[in-house]
Amino acid sequence: MPNSLARKFQQWVSAKLDLPEDVFMDIPRLTMIGHLHLYIENHSGLLSFSPDEIRVLLKHNHGQMIIKGKDFVIKTILPEELLLEGTIEMVKFIKE
């Protein structure tokens, strides 16, 4: 219950200050360019990597993200940002 109340408060503050929720609440932000590039912001780290599947841990109990496809290459990896290149076939969120 406290997490729910805190989340509602953050959403209210975000709306009142006219700030995007992804910036204020550290929720993941994805930018896809076709099916070839995926830019992920606000993550907590890479859980696994193979040329066909990547698992990314999301911040603040948002779970995990699974990306499936082919020929994956990590072009950039920073503490909270990741740029993935390859053929992206699926992006799935798993709430833990």
Image (tube, grey):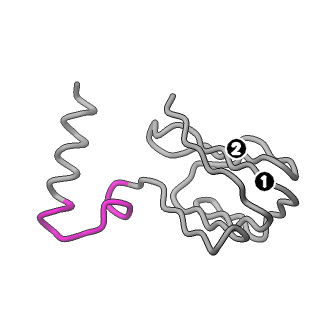
Q: Position of residue 8 (x, y in %)?
A: 19, 43
The residue under label 1 is 69
| Left or right: 34 in relation to 18 | right
- How many discs mark residues in the rendered view? 2
Segment tinted magenta in the rendering = 14-25
Residue 27 pos. (x, y %) = 42, 53
Residue at position x 37%, y 64% from top? 23
- Residue 94 in the image: above or below residue 37: above
Q: Quadrant of residue 31?
A: bottom right
Mark 2 sits on what residue?
Answer: 55
Residue ID at (59%, 62%): 40
x and y percentages locating residue 51 in the rendered image: 87, 52
- Left or right: 52 in relation to 29: right
**Residue 73 picture location, percent across and down:** 84, 63
Distance from disc 2 to disc 1, alpha carbons, whole Å, reads: 12 Å
Per the image, is 57 magenta?
no
Say which of 70 and 74 sits in front.
70
